[in-house]
Amino acid sequence: MLFNSVGFLIFFPIVLLVYYVIPKKIRYLWLLAASYYFYMCWNAKYAVLLFTSTVITYASGLLLEKAKQADIDELKKNRYKKSVVALSFLSNLGILCYFKYINFILFNLTRAFSLVHIDLSVPAVDVILPVGISFYTFQALSYTMDVYRDEIYAEKNFFRYALFVSFFPQLVAGPIERSKNLLRQLAEPKKFDYNMAREGFLLMLWGFFLKLVIADRIAVFVDTVYGNYTDYGGYYLIVATVLFAIQIYCDFSGYSTIAMGAAMFLGIRLMENFNAPYLSLSVGEFWRNWHISLTSWFKDYLYIPLGGSRKGKIRKYFNKLTVFLVSGLWHGAQFTYIAWGGLNGLYQIIGEALQPVRDKAVARLGLHRESIGHRLACVVITFVLVDFSWIFFRAQSISDAFNIIASIFGADNPWIIPDGSIYECGLDVKNFRLLVVCMAVLLIADILKRRGIKVREVILKQDYWFRWIIIAVSVCFVLLFGKYGKRLDSAAFIYFQF
């Protein structure tokens, strides 16, 4: 079930109505049933995988809690606890690996053997990637590790824990919530909070604006150009690559924002997943503001266990590169994603290594880091670097990515904008102008957000009549321009494939 579907517009009000009518003691059971229904609308049989991951991590929590209370030697206790954690991780990651990477592994294994002239005929496995498996697997595993670290209690109520893993607003595309935030909130259902509901509605409205008006509109142009990049080379690809950076931001941030808003109707606050990432001054800062829940997951459960920055610079750089390569692989079973992750890791390593040189250059040139010009230059450079890496993320193969890069650097058709050729790639001049205006609105909202000003809070402080005019106009705008033209049908969110 898509957020941007008629089905969800029927489903969500029913969930809310029943949730606040029934007794508090059984509300979590209703949400659990609604969450499984929400997930099973894609493929009912894969709910078994969701349930399996839930059972494994729930049992691991109980075993860890039992071990903590056992009167045995401390050394044996620690070994037992580590064995439980290892079993939980291996079993869950094994399921994830099979459904997401098995054909990727078999294909590349076959190619590797062919290099030494061994014909390894292994048929492809007929599997469909379950929606959201990477998200709920990581969320469940974080619970196991949090119990092991004594950061959260072991949940005794299986159904409440099952709700934590399957909570429908953020089930299939995040944010990847931590047990110490979400599980505790689910344990204490609240009364209907009108103020939270108002804020949640504005969040959902903003999320729909990002997805339906901006992301889906950009997708028409990007899909046209990247789908036939040999015909649409040069400046077509430059524009499409810049727009793809905005598309994936609005698409993914739109989902997270809708999820946050929907959860607020239920009295639950989810973590913020994006903080105006394209206004970052460095690639490192970008990753602290982009997909925050995943970045922090890798930091807490992979980077720090690998040694973090505690074992010297070389080991620190190795750990960072490892994390980003794994992050790329997490996104998909393709070398393009691995290259994208590795490139972002290299950006940060090179940036840190050259920091002393940059500091000296700034001092000798008499530059002021806090000046508007310097900060703007840093933002532009960071965007260019990040946007360049998106080429690998969007391309269908490594060879396609390098062909696209070659076409961009050999661009010799700057006339496509003044002569109107650019308006023949799915978006006419009216749609392009509307898109530019909407992206300007996004930029202003992100600048205000970085300055600590939340537009929704400003709206909610206005007189009721003015507030409702703003909301009514915004709703009409999304409904009117969210599906502008025959090709702008509601599309699935990009991160559903991960």
Image (cartoon, grey):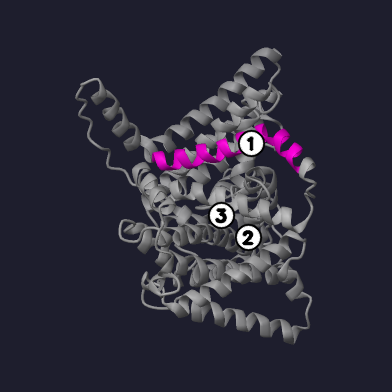
Of the numbered discs 2 and 1, the one sitting upstream in the chain is 2
Q: Position of residue 201 (x, y in %)?
A: 64, 71
Indicate whether 444 appears above or below 294: below
The residue positioned 69% from the left and 12% from the top of the image is 73
**Depth order, front residue of 320/365:** 365
Question: Which residue is denoted by mark 2 in the rendering?
Answer: 260
Indicate whether 59 appears above or below 254: above
The residue positioned 49% from the left and 40% from the top of the image is 328
Question: How many other residues sit within 10 Å of disc 1, few (<14), some (14-19) or many (≥20)?
Answer: some
Residue 175 visible in rendering: yes
Q: Amino acid at mark 1?
A: Lys
Of the numbered discs 3 and 2, the one sitting upstream in the chain is 3
Question: How many other residues sit within 10 Å of disc 2, few (<14), some (14-19) or many (≥20)?
Answer: many
Could you tell me what secondary structure mostly forms the magenta stretch? helix
Question: Which residue is denoted by mark 3 in the rendering?
Answer: 170
Q: Are marks 3 and 2 in contact (CB under 8 Å)?
A: no
Screen quadrant of the N terminus: bottom left
* Alpha carbon separation for disc pair 3 and 2: 8 Å
Q: Position of residue 91 (x, y in %)?
A: 47, 31
**Helix, strand or loop under label 1:** helix
Q: Which mark is residue 299?
A: 1
Describe residue 75's horizontal placement relative to residue 51 as left or right: right
Of the numbered discs 1 and 3, the one sitting upstream in the chain is 3
As for residue 479 lying within the magenta part, the answer is no
Q: Amino acid at mark 3?
A: Gln
Q: Position of residue 165 (x, y in %)?
A: 55, 46
Residue interval drawn in magenta:
333-362
Q: Amino acid at mark 2?
A: Met
The residue positioned 56% from the left and 62% from the top of the image is 254
